[in-house]
Amino acid sequence: MTLLERDPKSPLTWSGNLPVTSRYTFGLAGEKFFRAIKDEGKIIGSYCKKCDHTYVPASQFCEKCLAEVSDWVDVGTIGELHTFTVLYEGYDGARLVQPEIVAFISLGDGGLIHRLGEINLDEIYFGMPLEAVFLPEGQRQGSILDIRYFKPAG
Amino acid sequence: MNERVAIVGIGWSGYRSKSADLSYKELIYESAVKAYADAGVDPRKDIQSFVTVAEDFHEGTSIFDEYTPDQLGAALKPVHTITGDGLHGLATAYMLVKTGQFDIVAVEGHSKASNILTLPEVTAYAQDPILNRPLRFNTHFVAGLEMNRFLFETGTTQEQCAAVVQKNRRNALNNPKAPYGADLTLEDILSGPVLSWPLGKRDSAEHSDGAIVMVLASESTARHLNDKPIWILGMGWCNDSPSLESREWGELPYIQKAAQIAYRQAGFRNPQGIIDFAEIDDTYSYKELQSLEALGFCLPGEAGILTEDGATEVDGELPVNASGGSLGMGHMIDATGLARALEVVLQLRGEAGLYQLEDVNVGLAQSWRGIPTTSGAVAVLAN
Ligand SMILES: [Zn+2]
């Protein structure tokens, strides 16, 4: 049902856009987490004693009991594959020439989302150990991209 | 206020894959005047408060809520826009009547999805900007990860997910509002292009444009307005921790909690045997199965089997998405949950036409706010 009969020569639409650029502050825990990646090639979490829960990435507070968390723990660079997917579309919705393997890797009681590398699809299984592959020390800038990907451990 | 609250008016425009002829204001206007005529109310005199549901980035306009009053007849009246799914809007309108301060309240939700020319990027902008967005993954990866874990934990199969697509798109053939009706074989669905394996493109709902308006009233007022009031027996909503790093991947605890809240208000614990039919989230095929389990209609791992056995068909034990759902009608972005609720109202009024279910008295609507969120809502409605 339409309310209007349009003149085919009339202007139909107007297009607009907006450059959106924002700055995102890492915060106290985020800074510790990304400095450990950048300076030491380590993945750290934070431990809530009351809940016996290790947050990865490190968090300044416990979302379960809302206590401030101040015990920082090195959780190592090897986690377990919790779930994975093979992504066929890019950020803008265009079809990817080379599909990407994306996974959630459990570390502590949390984990990280990242891509997998040096791996064949048919060797993937739930629970498999995966190891973070870091950029060389001088190239790391303190971001999630300092980890290039996770690969089968060992 | 202990009075019950009823939905006394409904109106919609759409749904269509494109709506090049109408502006969003005209879509909303068309729905609003239908809903007001249906309820027998004059919006300028009778409706005391208005709720709208919208997201600035989906509208392409900052502070979009400023653009909602005029087409609803809401200028110089209390109006507020909430961000969330349409069912959150219905819950808000319900609460406004429950306060006892307003007898008649309207709620509006709409989708002009076809005008969002960069929807993948807009959705990706909802990813965590520090932990996830720098990886530049299309946001469907979240659904792919969730589906794969759900299949792993419950033993559900891709074929069972495809059976949801087959059912809902066939149901849509009987619904004149549904633009995506189709009679597909399981093979058609399973052999389609992959989106984020194990998720196929055909497991994922297309979008549609449209608008929905509902009028709610307190019990004493409702009795004067409409001979088919549809009662809200319970409404619950719940949000999990949004982070991809701390959420559950195989199940939907926030839908479970939202359902428990709604069921408690409605006075029951177990929906089996009480709810006659359901209109639930099927943004992705597996979501219908995962949601059925979270809603307590069956145990984890059973929803796929029940679907294959036909239990959720229009002539099954619990018809699910008889309207065609989002897979058949198109995903309506922020209005999706309101679209599900509208279908429940039509069924309970006996106005669903070709897809009218027999002997239905209590229906359930459930929604999810979409990737990458962990927000959902549940409504229990009765005639
Ligand atoms: Zn704690």
Image: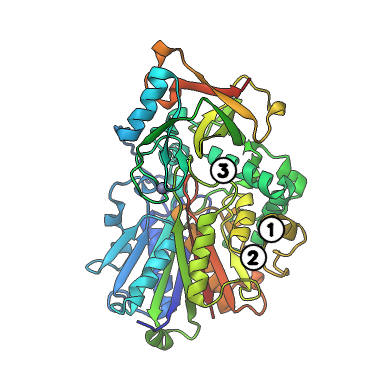
- Whether residue B79 is visible here, answered yes or no, is yes
Which is nearer the eye, B166 or A43? A43
- Whether residue B14 is visible here, answered yes or no, is no
Quote the CA–CA distance across marks 3 and 1: 18 Å
At a point 29% along the width and 46% down the height, the residue shown is B62
Q: Amino acid at mark 1?
A: Ala
**Chain under label 1?**
B
In the rendered image, which residue does mark 1 sit on? Answer: B303
**Chain under label 2?**
B
In the rendered image, which residue does mark 2 sit on? Answer: B297
**Could you say whether the residue bearing mark 2 is in a helix, strand or loop?**
loop
Snapshot colouring? rainbow
Q: Is residue B172 left or right of residue B79?
A: right
In the rendered image, which residue does mark 3 sit on? Answer: B143
**Discs 1, 2 touching: Cβ within 8 Å:** yes
For disc 2, the neighbor class at 10 Å (few under 14, some 14 to 19, many from 20) is: some
Which is nearer the eye, B190 or B13? B190
Marks 3 and 1 share the same chain: yes
Q: Amino acid at mark 2?
A: Phe
Sequence order check, earlier mark of 3 and 1: 3
A92 above or below B66?
above
